[in-house]
Image: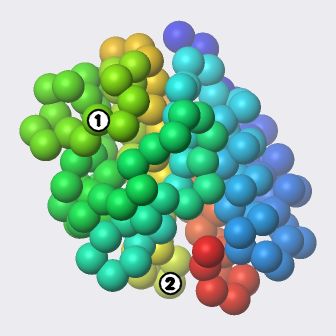
Amino acid sequence: MNHADYRLLDSQLRALLGDESDALAATSNFVALLYNALDDVNWLGIYVRRGDELVLGPFQGKTACVRIKLGDGVCGTAAATLATQRVDDVHAFPGHIVCDADSRSEIVVPLLVNRQLIGVLDIDSPSLARFDATDQRGIEALCDTFCSLQETRSGFI
């Protein structure tokens, strides 16, 4: 499997979002950048925390589930535990929420700004075990960059 050049993506992300003051525009471009850079991905998006649930934000791919309770499915588990969930086979994940039956593996990274959960980045693939430890580290680093840039913006989407 070819790994994305996560260092290059980080540089592109900083250049793309560095001066952007609008959180929605920045988030939309973050999602588009990753979706177009990562191979073998069929859905990529942000779910935003709203109280005790996650609400669909900017995404690329087919239509998706709009609301997910904290603790439910892969996204809700990542949000509730504040830990990345890397799932090789989503159909074997207890309580998996099927939004796209073509998705076989998934990685979900919690997004923290000022140590507060603002949402999660969710990436799906039609291939089993698409994401490995290198991808996890790279995607987590990109999320850290995104969140550090979000700290300079007022509010979140």
Q: Could you tell which of marks 1 and 2 lies nearer the N-terminus?
A: 1
Residue 73 pos. (x, y %)? 22, 48
Question: Does residue 46 lie above or below 148 as drawn?
Answer: above
Question: Does residue 71 lie above or below 91 as drawn?
Answer: below
Disc sitting over residue 114 in the figure: 2
Q: Within the image, what quadrant is residue 26 found in?
A: bottom right
Q: Within the image, what quadrant is residue 154 found in?
A: bottom right
Disc sitting over residue 128 in the figure: none
Q: Is residue 43 left or right of residue 127?
A: right
Q: What residue appears at the point 85 percent right and 71 percent down from the top-left corner?
A: 20
Element type where label 2 sits in the image: loop
Q: Is residue 84 left or right of residue 140?
A: left
Residue 157 pos. (x, y %)? 62, 74
Q: What residue appears at the point 29 percent right and 35 percent down from the top-left corner?
A: 98
Marks 1/2: CA–CA distance: 31 Å
Q: Within the image, what quadrant is residue 150 found in?
A: bottom right
Residue 126 pos. (x, y %)? 43, 18
For label 1, the residue is: 98
Q: What residue appears at the point 36 percent right and 37 percent down from the top-left corner?
A: 99
Q: Nearer the viewer, residue 107 or 136?
A: 107
Mark 1 nearby-residue class (10 Å; few <14, some 14–19, many ≥20) = few
